[in-house]
Image (cartoon, coloured by chain):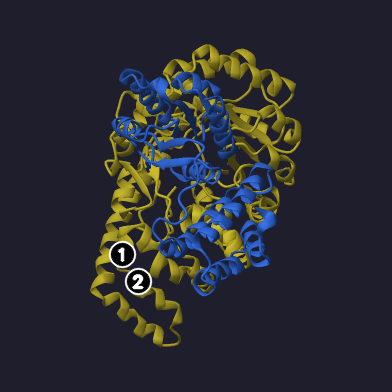
Amino acid sequence: MMAMENLDPTPPVSGMHLLAEPSLAAKAAYDKRWQRIMDCVALKQSDRMPVALFTTFWLAKYGGISIRDNMYDYEKVADIMERACLEFEPDITTPVMENASIGNVLEATGFKQLQWPGHGVGDNQPYQYLDREYMMAHEYDDFLLDPTGFFLGKYLPRVAGAFEGLEPLASLSGNMYYGISFASILFCLPQVQEALGKLAMAGGAVANHMNKTGGLVQRLRCLGFPYGFGAFSGAPYDVVADYMRGAKGMMTDLYRHKEKLEEVFDKVRKLVIRQTIAMAKMNGNPLVFIPLHWAPDAFMSQKQFEKFWWPSFRQFMLDLIDADLIPVPMWEADCTKRLEVIKDIPAGKCIYWFERTDMVKAFEVLGDVVALRGNISASALTTGTPEDVDKEVRRLGDQVWNKGGSLILDAAFGIPDESSIENVRAMFSAARKYAG
Amino acid sequence: MDNDLTDEERQLVTWLADMNEDDALPLANRMLLEGKKNPMRVLELCRAAMDIVGKRFEEGEYFLPELVLAGEMLDTIGAVAKPLIKQGEGGEAVKLGKILIGTVHGDLHDIGKNIVSFMLDINGFEVRDIGIDVPVKTFIQEINDFKPDVVGLSGFLTLAFDSMKETIDAFEKEGIRNNFKVMIGGGQIDETVRVYTGADAFGVNAVEAVNLCKIWMEAA
């Protein structure tokens, strides 16, 4: 999801109102699917194990288009998405418009943190994140003092070209009384005007994208399928590590700047939570998808995890829960050693999606606290046979769902882009064969 | 080595191994620039400290942050020490074996690969790291030039499965596949992927990579 603050005031989902309302049958199908997910969250079982269709660029393979087309051609992607939903009948669908069809949005803003087809990687390669220091260690204090000033003056121009030129605006919060009137002169500066012009164009592209997204959400609703997530977000530690300090910078900061980190994570949490709640409310969907990058067992010691990583994320989830939202953290890689720690959250409020953590073990530890999601392996889906996939689904069906677990079946990290269509079919049909 | 150390030398090893960068770096600088200590000796002390770091990593006390910080401390001291080494002095220690490592084509990830390179290096292997997004052709050229005992293929994305398979298939076609062992590693790699790609082994972390290389070198 893209931030809408300060952008073109066009209503983001105006296209929705032009579309038909769902038929009674579609509404009933939608409600039933949605209820399966909500039952899982509430740690209850419904008529069958729900199955998610979550993809990045797999729809390109399914629909026979290039990944580049997947990134840019909303109409084609929407058609393919509809076809995939009608074939697989998932209980929850992928937020394809937000995670894999964002070429025009990235292009319009001159986004620099990713390479994508048409921008740095080949037409059939997925996008890749460019791990860099986007904020220097010595800038922590600037960020803490005035995050918006730091964003305008330093961070935004570093990560997105459309913001280049806004640097003089970083001083706005230093003005007072009628000095504020004089400060408007900043907006006469040619570099600021040029940037504002570019951003107005970019905002238009984003509004167009969000209209299309609204259209797709409603189109799927009319077919009876709940759409992806209400918001996309990040754990405070990960936001700093991934998007600001870079992997190496963050890891060394655990020693070099450890005294500042708690305050930084707290500040980031408060800023990100505000935006996350606003997005989810605007989209009318309580599910908040939070891919987690730095929690895995192998990345830091348990002591570091409990000191630096978990406290701000736990509070982040509690904030979401307080706002009647449902955190869906995706615990990447293997987080088995973290299970006892991450259990400390109110029961029946979250969906924990595990990538490589053994789901049976996760069920033992967390079964009475959170719903589970995942985790058919990427290797089975990409290099295995339908029989291999069937076997993995059966294991989870038998050992989690059929033992009372609230499991939403999904691939470990969503369907890998390279998965064969037969293997994906096997995942869905096995789910129905072994778990309702 | 421990018995031969002066108090100052022991202090440097301890501070480096304990991640006490604030004290270790000034001490190393003093030893090199003011004490006129033989730079080869300072680098030996660094090596001894890195042995301890490696052991702590293997034992589950240290994790990625410590390996990264240790690597940075080592680089900083090396940058001061290396220009002070007189020609012909010291000489390289005997290496356990030669390892060529790179991230396969289509994948730009390098953090895991860099950690593996670092761990292999501090464990006494001669490592040639040929970077990220490495075309098959480049792997073959580098192998023919370096003549490694082990080739490590790294990849984080699922597309790397096919790139690894293609790369290993190309080794077969070139008739060089039996000249070295192939290990693979990265976020999603497991036994299913190993079989698919035709690699000899896979590892889930840097310690496993080091152990694989040690076992292969002992058997050779």
Query: Where, by quadrant of the figure, is residue A75 drawn?
Result: top left
Judging from the image, mark 2 belongs to the subunit labelled: A
Vertically, is A346 above or below B69?
above
Specify whether A22 is left or right of B133: right
Q: Which residue is mark 2?
A: A167
Residue depicted at x 66% and y 30%: A358
Disc tally is 2
Badge 2 crowding class, 10 Å Cα cut-off, few under 14, some 14 to 19, many 20 or more, is: many
Whole-percent x, y for residue A269 in the image:
58, 58
Whether label 1 touches label 2, CB < 8 Å: yes
View extreme (front): residue: B88
Give coordinates of residue A195: x percent, y percent.
28, 65
In what element is the residue under mark 1?
Answer: loop
* Residue A33 versus residue A236 in the image, above or below: above
Q: Mark 2: which secondary structure?
A: helix
Marks 1/2: CA–CA distance: 7 Å
Q: Which chain is yellow?
A: A
- Front-lying residue, B197 or A368: B197
Q: For the point 40% across and 30% down, which residue is it?
A: B159
Labels 1 and 2 positioned on one and the same chain: yes
**Residue occupying the far bottom of the picture:** A178
**How far across and down, in percent of the image, does residue A377 sit?**
55, 26
- Chain that is coloured blue in the picture: B
Task: Classify residue A206 as left or right of residue A37.
Answer: left
> Taking the image as drawn, is residue A272 in sight?
no
Q: Is residue A329 visible?
A: yes
What residue sits right under mark 1 in the picture?
Answer: A164
Q: Amino acid at mark 1?
A: Glu
